[in-house]
């Protein structure tokens, strides 16, 4: 198999540009497995392909690739191309998480397009099929999310690296997939149990987002490269700080962000009642603002209701506190990066990724 030639891979845009043909190549190869199942399956998997190929900044493959470089992996050559392909497979883990998360949250849009379950509900309705369009859309999206996770394994393990590299990365790869699903369960249980504690919200952030967004991708890439235990430990600590900072910044955007940046309706997290560390902080402050937030979040808010919820959040000081924590975590990760026992050429790459990660308007 001839792998696509990638451009220089030192900035996020370069890495994303290198990942895209890897994904396209893999999806093309899946046609031999998909088409014999029939046109219905081919049509559904085409929807998954659209979702994956119009993805965001390829943050998870970028951190995995940077872990590869940090662990001493070469930036060019046949082994590097196989490593890039393995790193690119994290986009399918991301696809699984997002597709299922959108069902759980009843989200209508993702990246400026209908969510997968809405897309297939609309298809069902347009064709006049029997039964509930909503149930059909959700069932199809669940299966496509499952398929994305299976394809992540296929792409990772079929990238063409030596068996010993996979053995070194196996535990990190397994932990990443387990943690993201466990974090999602913590999220829905916390919501059902009405757990307003900061502890619960932060545990969700740690395992639902920070682990599979930064920490474990760095771990996977570094392990594939044969990094030392000391290097992996340092990268994981940096990854946790950056991953938490990323989610806290995402929470701020979810409450106050521009839909042109987030790809979601303005104030979507307030309407859904997402229990973020920011909301936990606000509710713990008590007083009239916290009381108003309890009455507003998680309800079918109109634009005026969203503005009232935002005003109540600001009154508690929670948004400022979260922004301060983002800056603190980023500074700590940057300081640790300067001392980490990793390949020197990887330091500026990781520093640039960290800057983009916490500045979501970039």
Image: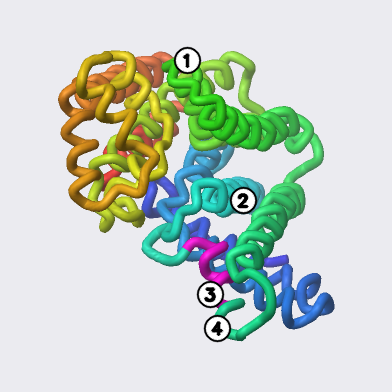
Q: In this image, 91 relative to 252: left or right?
A: right
- Which sits earlier in the primary sequence, circle 2 or circle 1? 2
- Which sits earlier in the primary sequence, circle 1 or circle 3? 3
Instruction: Tell me which residue sits at (23%, 29%) in the image.
Output: 313
- Which sits earlier in the primary sequence, circle 4 or circle 2? 2
Q: Which mark is residue 122?
A: 3
Q: Name the quadrant containing residue 121.
A: bottom right
> Is disc 3 surrounded by few (<14), some (14 to 19) or many (20+) residues within 10 Å?
some
Q: In this image, 302 relative to 128: left or right?
A: left
> Is disc 4 surrounded by few (<14), some (14 to 19) or many (20+) residues within 10 Å?
few
Q: Which mark is residue 199?
A: 1
Color scheme of the displayed model: rainbow
Residue behind mark 4: 126
Q: Nearer the viewer, residue 302 or 118?
A: 302
Quadrant where the N terminus is found in the figure: bottom right
Q: Main secondary structure of the magenta part?
A: helix
SS class of the residue under badge 4? helix
Q: CA distance from mark 1 to mark 4?
A: 45 Å
Q: Which residues are magenta?
A: 115-123
């Amino acid at each position: 198999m001839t792998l696509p030639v990638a451009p220089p891979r030192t900035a996020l845009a370069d890495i994303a540009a290198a990942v895209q043909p890897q994904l396209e190549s893999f999806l093309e190869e899946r046609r031999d497995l998909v088409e014999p199942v029939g046109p219905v399956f081919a049509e559904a998997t085409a929807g998954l392909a659209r979702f994956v190929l119009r993805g965001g900044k390829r943050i998870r493959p970028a951190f995995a690739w940077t872990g590869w470089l940090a662990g001493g992996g070469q930036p060019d050559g046949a082994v590097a191309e196989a490593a890039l392909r393995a790193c690119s497979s994290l986009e399918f883990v991301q696809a699984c998480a997002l597709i299922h998360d959108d069902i759980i949250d009843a989200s209508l849009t993702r990246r400026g397009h209908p969510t997968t379950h809405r897309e297939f509900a609309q298809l069902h309705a347009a064709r006049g099929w029997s039964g509930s369009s909503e149930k059909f859309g959700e069932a199809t999206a669940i299966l496509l999310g499952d398929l994305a996770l299976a394809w992540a394994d296929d792409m990772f393990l079929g990238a063409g690296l030596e068996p010993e590299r996979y053995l070194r990365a196996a535990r990190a790869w397994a932990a990443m997939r387990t943690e993201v699903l466990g974090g999602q369960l913590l999220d829905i249980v916390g919501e059902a149990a009405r757990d307003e504690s900061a502890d619960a919200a932060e545990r969700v952030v740690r395992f639902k987002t920070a682990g599979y967004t930064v920490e474990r991708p760095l771990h996977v890439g570094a392990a594939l490269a044969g990094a030392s235990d000391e290097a992996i430990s340092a990268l994981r600590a940096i990854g946790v700080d950056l991953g938490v900072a990323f989610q806290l910044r995402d929470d701020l955007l979810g409450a106050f962000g521009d839909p042109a940046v987030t790809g979601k309706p303005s104030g979507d997290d307030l309407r859904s009642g997402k229990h973020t560390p920011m909301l936990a902080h606000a509710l713990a402050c008590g007083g009239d603002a916290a009381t108003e937030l309890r009455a507003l979040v998680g309800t079918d808010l109109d634009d005026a209701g969203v503005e009232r919820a935002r005003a109540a959040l600001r009154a508690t000081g929670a948004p400022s506190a979260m922004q301060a924590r983002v800056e603190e975590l980023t500074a700590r990760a940057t300081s640790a990066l300067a001392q980490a026992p990793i390949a020197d050429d990887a330091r500026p790459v990781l520093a640039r990724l960290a800057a983009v990660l916490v500045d979501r308007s970039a």
